[in-house]
Amino acid sequence: KAGVTQTPRYLIKTRGQQVTLSCSPISGHRSVSWYQQTPGQGLQFLFEYFSETQRNKGNFPGRFSGRQFSNSRSEMNVSTLELGDSALYLCASRRAPSLSHRADTQYFGPGTRLTVL
Amino acid sequence: DAKTTQPPSMDCAEGRAANLPCNHSTISGNEYVYWYRQIHSQGPQYIIHGLKNNETNEMASLIITEDRKSSTLILPHATLRDTAVYYCIVRVEDNQGGKLIFGQGTELSVKP
């Protein structure tokens, strides 16, 4: 079974631009989460989508947004890029949010390395 | 904030067992402990998870103390390819299905 795929793998943008990153989950997985990883802050949760709806959100400004399509693929968008947005952006998928508190493992993609100049 | 505390770094000799400790003293009764590892800024790789019983799979064993305030990940025969940052995570449960809150992890160096 193919893993989580993310495109593009590397991206260079300049301040003020906007960027869209794409994530395709593992087949059969309907939940997609996004994380930002920087040397200073580590891995931070951005948001999670399930059934085309945002289910959970971390503490990031409104410049960070996302969406999910009917085939479970997800995109995240960052508008008005800042130098501090340079990071590795990771996508993770799981079958579904675990409303019954049953463990449900997330599997990560390879990430998109975004550099803002 | 992360609910786990890990040593920032550890060394292990190749072929020996690597025992990575984690403290999670504020864990709630229905919160699972997960372990992931990350190699060279690739995406984190799932290793194992547990609630209160010890768990074993083809990669590692997870030992959780009876009071659930700490756990240990054991890599039985460490190889050079096990050099990575290991994250111990308590999955925070909320009414949206839970989320992973990563801490700083332990950087494990396996040496020849």
Image (cartoon, coloured by chain):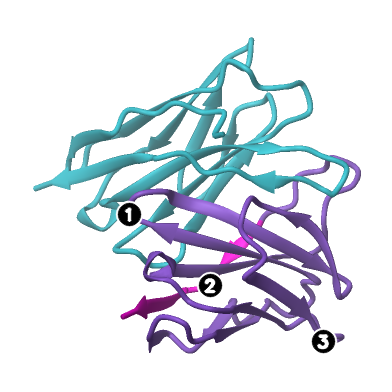
Query: Which chain identifier belongs to the cyan chain?
Result: B
Q: How far separated are the C-alphas under marks 3 and 1?
A: 33 Å
The one of A44 and B57 positioned closer to us in this rendering: A44
**Residue range corresponding to the magenta coloring:** A106-117
Q: Which residue is mark 2?
A: A109
The N terminus of chain B - image quarter: top right
Tell me the SS state at disc 2. Answer: loop
Q: Which residue is mark 3?
A: A71
Q: Residue drawn at (69%, 61%), measured in percent from left and top?
A: A47
Crowdedness near tag 3: few (<14), some (14–19) or many (≥20) residues, C-alpha within 10 Å: some
Tell me the SS state at disc 3. Answer: loop
Q: At label 2, which amino acid type do we have? A: Gly
Q: At label 1, which amino acid type do we have? A: Pro
Q: Which residue is mark 1?
A: A39
Please say whether residue B92 is one of the residues in the magenta stretch: no
Question: Within the image, what quadrant is residue B9 found in?
Answer: top left
Image coordinates of residue B74 in percent, x first then y, are 41, 34
Query: Which chain identifier belongs to the purple chain?
Result: A
Chain for numbered disc 1: A
